[in-house]
Image (cartoon, rainbow, N blue to C red):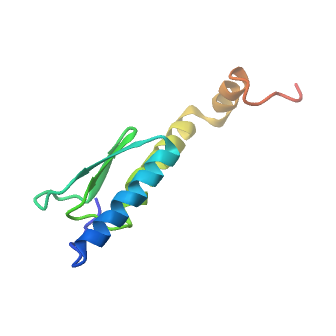
Amino acid sequence: YQRGYINDNLKETEFGIRDLAAKLAHRIGGEVKFISDLTKDYSGYNEGNTSVINLAKATLDTVPHEIVAHPIMRALKVKSEMGINSYIQQLEKEGIIEKECN
């Protein structure tokens, strides 16, 4: 997890975090929820398609880390586990790519 800090200008920071989070989540088709709890040891986390941002500890860096980086890493892991050949076969079956030669 990322260690956050409480900014003196909380209202401006909270607005920026909420705004950036909403825009990024919308772009990738995800969902974002907000909490504000100083007792939690995290500034945010991601579960599947939902990211949770802890406003009490989050910074603007937390938002792309949770909303964008975790889903990208999860997708890369899945694709590498599938293996490149089976991934290509799947793309061919779904009509996303066409095989040009035999």
Rendering coords of residue 30 (x, y %): 43, 42
Q: Residue furthest right?
A: 101
Residue at 26% in and 60% down: 43
The answer to which of 56 and 10 lies nearer the viewer is: 10
The answer to which of 48 and 84 lies nearer the viewer is: 48
> Looking at the image, can residue 38 be seen?
yes
Residue at 64% in and 28% down: 86
Rendering coords of residue 31 (x, y %): 38, 42
Residue at 21% in and 79% down: 8
The quarter of the image holding the N terminus is bottom left
The answer to which of 44 and 78 lies nearer the viewer is: 44
**Apparent side of residue 27 relative to residue 7 in the rendered image (left or right):** right
Rendering coords of residue 73 (x, y %): 48, 48
Residue at 46% in and 53% down: 23
**Apparent side of residue 5 relative to residue 22 in the rendered image (left or right):** left
Q: Residue furthest bottom?
A: 8
**Is the residue 6 above or below the residue 29 in the image?**
below
> Looking at the image, can residue 68 be seen?
no
**Is the residue 77 above or below the residue 22 in the image?**
above
Q: How many marks?
A: 0
Q: Residue furthest left?
A: 39
Q: Residue furthest top?
A: 93
Rendering coords of residue 78 (x, y %): 51, 37
